[in-house]
Image (tube, rainbow, N blue to C red):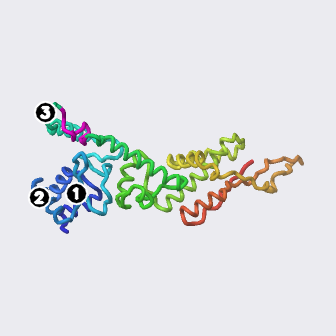
Amino acid sequence: MEKSSPGEVLRKHCKWIEASKFVELVAKKIGKSERWAKKLISDAYKDKQIKKHVFQDRTVIYGLTEFGPPTISSIEVGNMIASGLPPLDVVRVNSEISELEKREKPPKTSEGKLPRYVPTKTYGFAGMYIPPVKDILKAETENNIRIVQEARRELRFFREPTPSETAGKLGCTPQAARVLLYELAPLTGWKEQAQEQAQKEAEDAINLAGWRLWEKKGEQDPMLKAECDKAKNQASADVYRRAEAIVQNYPDLVPILYQIEPISNAKSKRPTGKGVVTTFPQINLTILQWPEKTKAKWQQIFKCKPPPPTEYWSS
């Protein structure tokens, strides 16, 4: 397949694309007119190098088999991607559908009635409701957001779901799922994480969840309060969000502060030069202990042992 062929242009584009936008893209790549680009696209389709899909509202899109099943949310219309908010061209599409309805209304019968099959206002036929493109986009976007949130709950909010983990429920290939997840990112906050980054953020979020629970109990310990404030101040917005989600949805996974026996301090009582004994505050060693359920879930998600407990000094 030539580098400037429609198939290769689609392969680099990595997603289904609306017909007019595809023509512009191919024409730009080959450096020729759009008319010539249309001919190349037509030839490529006839040779089964590319796939074409026509929606009920007559929107035409092109893609490859590897992109997965075509959906309205996978179309790039004009210069905007349908990523949750209705693209500007939806207004144009609905307007064109209205014009089609006006032009294609059948003549009335001799009794002054319309024939049995009459185009409805949603460009269907009597008894068959076809929602506008805008409503389809909204419904698909809401469903895809729900799929991402369910995947997060399955992972107990420790990390973000991967394209491979969501592809099945999104009904597409992992490559297409990755594109869709990035399109939904402004609405879901999803991001792609490296393994090391995911583990570090998960550990911080789980520990912060423990501190949030300790704080809500109203415990009073100056040294631990300082550690709690430090954990909150150093946490990113994403880590903070995960910690809150763990506390609210899975309280049984939240770590607890466990105080070990007081540490023997040789300087806790020390005589001064005048023979007066001065008593120093006793220091305790406290650890942030993860429940066994949390450790098991960590091993299931990350396929490795959980990190050791974090130690703190308390008064």
Give the residue at the far front of this rendering.
111
| Three-letter amino acid code at the position of disc 1 | Lys
Quarter of the image where the N terminus is located: bottom left
- SS at circle 3: loop
Question: Residue 240 placed where, x, y %?
Answer: 54, 46
> How far apart are the alpha carbons under marks 2 and 1?
14 Å
In terms of sequence position, does the residue under pointer 3 or pointer 2 come before the other? 2
> How far apart are the alpha carbons under marks 3 and 2?
46 Å
In terms of sequence position, does the residue under pointer 2 or pointer 1 come before the other? 2
User: At 20% across and 65% down in the image, what residue appears?
Assistant: 48
| Three-letter amino acid code at the position of disc 3 | Ser
- SS at circle 2: helix
Question: Residue 141 placed where, x, y %?
Answer: 38, 46
- SS at circle 1: strand
Is-magenta flag for residue 117?
yes
The disc placed on residue 110 is: 3
**Which residue, given by chain and number where applicable, does mark 1 sit on?**
52
| Three-letter amino acid code at the position of disc 2 | Lys
**Which residue, given by chain and number where applicable, does mark 2 sit on?**
39
Residue 155 horizontal side relative to residue 13, left or right: right
Q: Between tags 3 and 1, which lies in front?
A: 3
Give the residue at the far bottom of this rendering.
1
Residue 161 horizontal side relative to residue 221, left or right: left
CB atoms of marks 2 and 1 within 8 Å = no
Which segment did they paint magenta?
113-125
